[in-house]
Amino acid sequence: MAPTSLFLQALPLLPVLALAADYPGIPKDLTTPVQQRIAFKGPNAISVGWNTYEQLAEGCVQYGKSANSLTSQACSAQSLTYGTSRTWANSVTLSGLDAATTYYYKINSTNSSVNHFMTARAPGDKTAFNLDVVVDLGVYGADGYTTSRKRDIPYVQPALNHTTIAALANTIDDYDFVLHPGDFAYADDWYLKPKNLLDGKNAYAAILENFFDQLAPIASRKPYMASPGNHEAACTEIPYTTGLCPEGQKNFTDFMTRFNGLMPTTFPSSSKNATAQAFAKKAASLANPPFWYSFEYGMAHIVMIDTETDFPSAPDGKDGSANLNAGSFGNTPTQQLDFLDADLASVDRTVTPWVIVAGHRPWYSTGDSKNICKPCQAAFEPLFYKYGVDLGIFGHVHNSQRFNPVYNNVADPAALKNPTAPAYIIAGGAGNIEGLSAVGANYSTNVFAYGDEFSYATVKFLDEQNLQVDFLRSDTGEVLDSSVLFKKHDVAFVRN
Ligand SMILES: *[C@@H]1O[C@H](CO)[C@@H](O)[C@H](O)[C@H]1NC(C)=O
Ligand SMILES: *[C@@H]1O[C@H](CO)[C@@H](O)[C@H](O)[C@H]1NC(C)=O
Ligand SMILES: *[C@@H]1O[C@H](CO)[C@@H](O)[C@H](O)[C@H]1NC(C)=O
Ligand SMILES: *[C@@H]1O[C@H](CO)[C@@H](O)[C@H](O)[C@H]1NC(C)=O
Ligand SMILES: *[C@@H]1O[C@H](CO)[C@@H](O)[C@H](O)[C@H]1NC(C)=O
Ligand SMILES: *[C@@H]1O[C@H](CO)[C@@H](O)[C@H](O)[C@H]1NC(C)=O
């Protein structure tokens, strides 16, 4: 959403305001890691990313299976920055790890501490697990959203206690990893705080620094799988103004730099079927992380897609409705859709019965029809249906919604009892400066919609046939909605 009118309303206030970007302090020790994040880089690999206020000749991570015996080390010379950034993004991949195993790690620095993570469950491991979904999560505080309810917690900044970040901290043992398909920080909304109006360039950079510091307690502990949203595109969402954005604040630059080298392409096929293996190889060659890619965790095959660019009439593309003039990121105009086709074709349900696809913009939503991305539906929905995607996860609309299985706007009569069509959720209520979206008019297959307080979703893989989706209120943990999708999963290679 682009509240252009707020920008115009704020202009007359200019002369009376103190102007200063709210940057976090630079640590004295410039090797101090900030904005830490990790991701599944492969079935036996975890990537570690962090920023520093100086360029590193070599970034290193020490790791091992016990906190006081970090006997292995991985290093990389990649230390990237861009036009308006004060920091460098570093990343290192730890490979050859055992599956479903806890490792301790320390980013090498004269000012860092030991943390830990658990590696991915091997594809085909049918152990139950949970993942969390947060979408549309913005910075909290001077340049972001605030609320008068303030409480203390040990993990994260005290003021965050009632937020979705605090909920993720308080429940850290309840989920194995996080999906965040788009809209981080809301740096492009800097102009909503009048104090920033004359210094957008620094305000944008400051919001990113603060947000990724706030997220670090979560993203450094739990693999944090990212894909792009419209708020990553440019310095403002005001149409036709991207040409005025400073270098480094357009065309998804921060997103690309920050997650460079962290997200996987695809995992190699664990299927015994040679055709499936060939599809998986093709998908690997077409994947383009952090924009589109896939990974596997136990009984789940999870695909992250880019609903912003790289398909016909993509909203943030050069000819797109948002006029944000970004992309393309593929080598050919069809690379993303060719990837999705090959990737979904490769899935062997005897190995990973559950297939989940997560992206930013939905094509089913309550409320205003401008919430719905028609070009996304045209591009992606036929592939979801053909390959029997079980659940589509989206955000963009700032609330929580759940839809019974539906294809081409027609409800699947089986509803949650072994449907052919995908079920859908929107988990966009995590909290940001634009506020929550009112729940609009009922869409035919919508069965739950909530936009009163911040909320997020937990997806529980109970077994090969039962998938539970819970929506939780962030500040209280109250379960707002709970459902179980049943799928027989009795066909190895689904083609509808
Ligand atoms: C060391 O890191 C902590 C944050 O982890 C920071 O608050 C502190 O300022 C750093 N110390 C120095 C000397 O840079
Ligand atoms: C580890 O970090 C320290 C402090 O920045 C540096 O002096 C040292 O060379 C680093 N070691 C490696 C192996 O990179
Ligand atoms: C968050 O604040 C509430 C109210 O002050 C408190 O009961 C709760 O323990 C806090 N959470 C944590 C994890 O400290
Ligand atoms: C192998 O996989 C392909 C699809 O990838 C499928 O059409 C074919 O039936 C499978 N073969 C066997 C023997 O399962
Ligand atoms: C955006 O970046 C991509 C990848 O670097 C590049 O191919 C594309 O041309 C850029 N788009 C614009 C509008 O600058
Ligand atoms: C939407 O309508 C359906 C069918 O009448 C109903 O089952 C469902 O509860 C409604 N959803 C909401 C969020 O009101």
Image (tube, grey):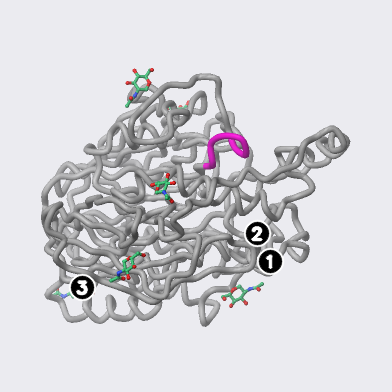
Answer whether residue 381 is visible to the viewer in this image: no
Question: For the residue marked with disc 2, what is the amino acid?
Answer: Ala
- Looking at the picture, which amino acid does disc 1 mark? Asn
Residue at (50%, 42%) from the top-left corner?
137
Mark 3: secondary structure: loop
Labels 2 & 1 near each other (Cβ < 8 A)? yes
Q: Earlier in the sequence, mark 1 or mark 3?
A: 3
312 with respect to 167 (left or right): right
Query: What residue is pinned by disc 2?
Result: 234
Query: Which quarter of the figure is the N terminus placed in?
Result: top right
Cα gap from disc 2 to disc 1, whole angstroms? 9 Å
Query: Which of disc 3 and disc 2 is earlier in sequence?
Result: 2
Q: The C terminus lies in which quarter of the figure?
A: bottom left
Magenta region: 138-144
- x, y percent for residue 27: 48, 51
Q: Which residue is mark 3?
A: 269
The residue under label 1 is 325
Task: Identify residue type, mark 3.
Answer: Ser
Q: Nearer the viewer, residue 426 or 22?
A: 22
Q: Is mark 1 within 8 Å of ligand 5?
A: yes
Position in image of residue 159 (x %, y %): 47, 28
Question: Which secondary structure, mark 1?
Answer: loop
**Main secondary structure along the magenta-highlighted residues:** loop
Asked if the residues shown at circle 1 and circle 3 are in contact, with their CB atoms under 8 angstroms apart, the answer is no
Residue at position x 30%, y 31% in the image: 170
Q: Is residue 34 visible?
A: yes
Quadrant in which residue 374 is drawn: bottom right
